[in-house]
Amino acid sequence: MADVTADGGGADVLRGQGCAVILLGPPGAGKGTQAQRIAQRYLLPHLSTGDMFRDHIQRGTDLGRKAKPLMERGELVPDAIVLGMVEDRISQPDCERGFVFDGFPRTIQQADDLEGICKRHKLGFTIVLYLVVNPELLVRRLTGRRICKASGHIYNVYERPPKREGFCDLDGSELIHRADDSEAVIGERLSAYDRQTQPLVEYYKLRGLLSSVDAMAEADTVTKSIVGILDGAKAF
Ligand code: AMP
């Protein structure tokens, strides 16, 4: 099989029609890792609402000040705030031909609003990749996650450790451990997922947009499954 993460390897497949790719699944399912790879292969912007909030917090904006305490407790940020931020981001020219969402939508309200957004952007289709992982693995994935401060590249000290502990293989930058990836907050994040986000599985299944992906396997295998689905999506 060809290199599944090759830059632009599948660009024509998705960008020709305009596509919203949504990664759905609990915290720790691998949404960030897979979203980075899909974005690279299909030349679509990777839109992580969690990253957008962390950027606001770092810049000390009003929005960041509102989101920070909620994120620290593992709760969701209110829909109105998330939706305003997403609308702003996807009005940028790089989003004209589609995007890869990671961590959005997370509530039925967000999903309903996204439908309107996709219509306004005249996107040809929406595809939801549901990453299925057994719950025991999630805590291990979250506590083991480390993120490159500079590039955002994601490692896992158990499954995909960096060559040199604490530093990125790609650019040597420091790796960080997110405060909300601590066991104290993970429980609340997982229960917020069960209460508010899991219903989206049924929501998208009913609309015929959901493709389930076995995300228990190692990252490369999961990427191959996803590429198979997205390349095949040409058909609908
Ligand atoms: P993530 O990086 O996707 O794990 O998100 C980190 C945190 O940001 C979440 O625990 C929420 O507090 C907040 N967040 C990110 N995306 C959303 C969203 N779509 N709706 C509400 N809160 C969000």
Image (spheres, rainbow, N blue to C red):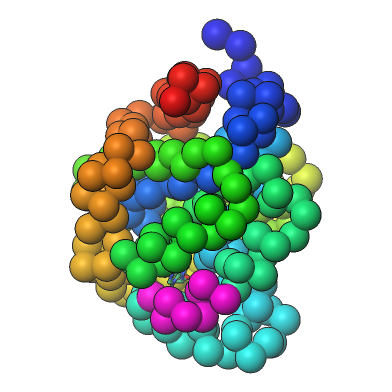
Q: Where is residue 218 in the image (x, y as percent from the top left)?
A: 41, 30
Query: Would you say residue 18 is visible in this rendering?
Result: yes
- Residue 41 relative to residue 80: left or right: right
Instruction: Find residue 155 and report its image quarter.
Output: top right
Which residue in the rendered view is the most extreme toward the top? Answer: 1
- Residue 142 relative to residue 168: left or right: left
Residue sitting at x 38%, y 63%: 112
Instruction: Find residue 49 and report its image quarter.
Output: bottom right
Q: Position of residue 179 (x, y in %)?
A: 48, 72
- Residue 64 relative to residue 30: left or right: right
Which residues are drawn in magenta? 76-84
Query: Would you say residue 186 is visible in this rendering?
Result: no
Instruction: Find residue 11 and report its image quarter.
Output: top right
Q: Nearer the viewer, residue 204 or 58?
A: 204
Q: Position of residue 102 (x, y in %)?
A: 50, 53
Q: Nearer the viewer, residue 52 or 211?
A: 211
Name the chief secondary structure element in magenta.
helix
Q: Position of residue 151 (x, y in %)?
A: 72, 51
Residue sitting at x 49%, y 60%: 116
Dividing the image into 4 quarters, which one contains the N terminus?
top right
Membership of 175 in magenta stretch: no
Residue sitting at x 36%, y 69%: 109
Residue sitting at x 43%, y 77%: 79
Membership of 79 in magenta stretch: yes
Residue 28 sits above or below residue 49 on the image? above
Residue 8 sits above or below residue 26 on the image? above
Dividing the image into 4 quarters, which one contains the C terminus?
top left
